[in-house]
């Protein structure tokens, strides 16, 4: 387990580089990530390459016992290229070109930009193919950042038509699959199909879903171009990419096969402000929401079921959220430990020094702009000294997360309060409060290794997905299905049969009605003899082949089944038709864990979490209050002790179930 940093030598005089790199080595850092935005420095004029500066920086990194992680620089093409080929730019939905002057403004489907990408990537990778100090590569940077997965230019229009023709073959098959008789939306030919430009009412949901799929496939193809060129130059290099937190526009699972491991960029105090509905607490503004951050760790680990990297870790205050409170003392170290507890093999802080220029001057580094240590420097050095090698995380529970269901419910939320990530997190938070490690995986993946699986919103369900879940339960898996599961088919049309469609027989239930409910309306139910609150969504269930174990106690749904369970020995299926709040979510997941014989802890308070990896248990405290631990006499403290101070961490060699919080 190692610590690293992101460095931009092109921002600083070369006379300073040796000092910077020596200080990185002194802090115990292992990796230095470079080059992601340097195309203009590498190729200041077409065909005139300047690698001398990067050669020198890489050599310094190697001389000080570290390794370089290089990045293909395609997120920021130079001005001369845009002037030569303005057609490489993306277009907004209304056709307005996205101008040069920032980053990520190029079209994934531009034939010209793909040619230019191949040219620059081939040049930089061949340059360092035999360099012993280069460990691997990050392809591009944050695909889709700034709302750029979906482009609406003429190149995308042509590519979309070709994509549709390859998928449907016949235009009448497309019209039927989408349901285009509604509002006379039939197409006479594939040539007549356009991207979804602005229109007075909402777009056809099936058209939108396929456009989102097409745009996602475009990124997959573009990423594969990078990966193939990198491996062509040196097959010993690793290839990764830095995904983003709670980012729904890009399906991370679809890129996983072309990457050796996934990386992501973790900014806890930013995410809690702009990713979650509602007001963040003071502690969250200082350290983030541990479950929000951990859920992204588990997503990018679960995509390949392999260790992941944090390729950008928040080092201090950052420039892009609405507010920039200084992180709590020790938070930057805490975040590194949490990442490792959830399966990270490396954590790289972004960045080494606060920059004097450009759009990110208000983004901290481990060092201040004058080169002196900032608050994150000691945290990073301390974490580097404390971490050690570990086996991968072994998670007994899968949380089934589906990007296409996210896209579809995002376009037809049926409630302003519907939020896919938050609904997912209702179950995830409950599992993590019980200390359970969770792999977040595609519902189409092999689930055989998991004792239990939770599927909060499998909105789009076809026969293949139903067959996968049926096989899982038949093999002894215990499955918990959540609200809105099975409402539609993969084309984003309602099933002819009543929801949950192809899952109805497996769950033994039919949805007779549904309602979305605003705040202020009574939303209560009874489950296992106790009254609980729920929110936002309620499906009324006909438990024709299952047992009703929860019923609504308020509103016109009073007396109707809300939660059902059926024994499918050796497995079982629970269907929860509503969005559970905290206590109800806890009851549902603990009943599931009990049925699946999954070890878990008593509930930990909000902001305090435990995670077990390779026989070691991390106790991470994201709160401003100290907590005391009780551990077995033979337990060994590796980091910290019985007192877990505010925004601190303890690591103890003992199973998580032997710990209690006093």
Image: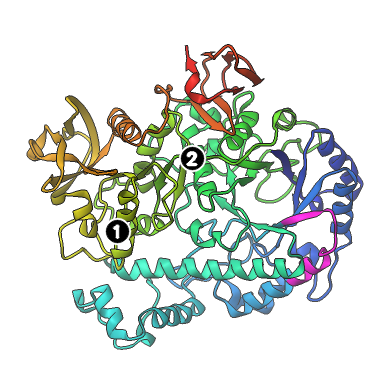
Question: Of helix, strand and loop, which one carries label 2?
Answer: loop
For this rendering, which residue is in front, 654 or 491?
654
Is residue 613 among the parts visible in the rendering?
A: yes
Residue 9 on the magenta segment: no
Question: Of helix, strand and loop, which one carries label 1?
Answer: helix
Relative horizontal placement of residue 227, taking residue 323 as reference (left or right): right
- How far apart marks 2 and 1 lie (CA) works out to 23 Å
* Quadrant housing residue 588: top left
Looking at the image, how many numbered discs can be counted on the residues? 2
Q: Residues within 10 Å of mark 2 (few under 14, many from 20)?
A: many
Task: Tell me which numbered mark, 2 or 1, is placed earlier along the sequence.
Answer: 2
For this rendering, which residue is in front, 219 or 48?
219
Q: Which residues are magenta?
A: 122-136
Residue at figure coordinates x 35%, y 34% from the top left: 593
* Quadrant housing residue 258: bottom right
Would you name the residue on which mark 2 appears?
A: 395
Image quarter where the N terminus lies is top right
């Amino acid at each position: 387990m190692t610590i690293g940093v992101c460095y931009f030598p092109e921002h600083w005089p070369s006379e300073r580089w040796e000092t910077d790199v020596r200080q990185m080595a002194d802090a115990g850092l292992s990796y230095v990530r470079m080059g992601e935005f340097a195309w203009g420095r590498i190729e200041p004029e077409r065909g005139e390459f300047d690698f001398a500066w990067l050669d020198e920086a890489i050599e310094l990194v190697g001389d000080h016992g570290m390794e370089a992680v290089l990045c293909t620089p395609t997120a920021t093409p130079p001005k001369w290229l845009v002037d030569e080929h303005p057609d490489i730019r993306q277009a907004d939905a209304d056709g307005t070109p996205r101008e040069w002057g920032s980053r990520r403004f190029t079209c994934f489907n531009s034939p010209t930009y793909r040619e230019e990408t191949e040219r620059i990537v081939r040049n930089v990778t061949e340059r360092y193919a035999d360099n012993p100090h280069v460990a691997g590569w990050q392809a591009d940077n944050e695909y889709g950042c700034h709302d750029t997965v979906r482009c609406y230019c003429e190149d995308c229009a042509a590519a979309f038509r070709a994509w549709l023709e390859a998928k449907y073959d016949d235009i009448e098959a497309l019209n039927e699959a989408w349901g285009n008789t509604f509002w006379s939306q039939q197409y006479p030919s594939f040539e007549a199909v356009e991207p979804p430009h602005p229109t007075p009412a909402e777009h056809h949901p099936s058209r939108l879903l396929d456009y989102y799929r097409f745009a996602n496939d475009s990124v997959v193809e573009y990423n594969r171009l990078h990966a193939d060129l990198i491996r062509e130059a040196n097959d010993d290099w690793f290839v990764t990419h830095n995904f983003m937190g709670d980012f729904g526009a890009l399906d991370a699972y679809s890129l996983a096969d072309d990457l050796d491991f996934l990386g992501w960029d973790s900014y806890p105090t930013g995410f809690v402000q702009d990713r979650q509905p509602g007001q963040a607490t003071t502690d969250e503004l200082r350290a983030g929401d541990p479950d929000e951050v951990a859920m992204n760790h588990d997503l990018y680990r679960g995509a390949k079921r392999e260790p992941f990297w944090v390729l950008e870790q928040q080092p201090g205050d950052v420039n892009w959220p609405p507010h920039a409170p200084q992180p709590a003392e020790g938070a930057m170290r805490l975040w590194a430990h949490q990442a490792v507890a959830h399966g990270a093999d490396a954590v790289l802080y972004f960045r080494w020094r606060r920059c004097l220029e450009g759009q990110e001057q208000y983004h901290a580094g481990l060092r201040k702009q004058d080169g002196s240590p900032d608050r994150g420097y000691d945290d990073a050095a301390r974490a580097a000294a404390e971490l050690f090698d570990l086996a991968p995380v072994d998670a007994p529970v899968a949380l089934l997360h589906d990007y296409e269901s996210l896209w579809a419910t995002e376009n037809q939320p049926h409630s302003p309060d519907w939020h896919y990530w938050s609904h997912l997190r209702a179950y995830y938070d409950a599992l993590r409060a019980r200390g359970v490690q969770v792999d977040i995986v595609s519902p189409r993946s092999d689930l055989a290794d998991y004792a239990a699986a939770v599927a909060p919103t499998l909105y789009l369900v076809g026969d293949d997905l139903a067959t996968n879940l049926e096989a899982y339960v038949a093999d002894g898996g215990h499955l918990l299905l959540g609200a809105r599961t099975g409402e539609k088919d993969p084309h984003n049309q309602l099933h002819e049969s009543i929801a949950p469609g192809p899952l109805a027989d497996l769950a033994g239930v039919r949805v007779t009605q549904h309602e979305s409910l605003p705040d202020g309306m009574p939303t209560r139910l009874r489950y296992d003899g106790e009254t609980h609150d729920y929110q936002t969504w309620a499906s009324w269930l006909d438990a024709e082949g299952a047992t009703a174990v929860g019923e609504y106690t308020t509103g016109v749904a009073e007396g109707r089944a809300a939660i059902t369970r059926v024994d499918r020995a050796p497995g079982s299926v629970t269907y929860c038709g509503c969005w559970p709040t905290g206590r109800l979510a806890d009851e549902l997941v603990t009943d599931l864990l009990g049925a699946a014989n999954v070890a878990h802890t008593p509930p930990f308070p909000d902001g305090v979490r435990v995670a077990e990896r390779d026989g070691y248990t991390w106790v991470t405290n994201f709160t401003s209050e100290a907590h005391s631990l009780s551990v077995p006499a033979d337990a060994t403290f590796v980091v910290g002790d019985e007192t877990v101070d505010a925004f601190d961490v303890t690591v103890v060699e003992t199973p998580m179930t032997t710990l209690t919080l006093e």
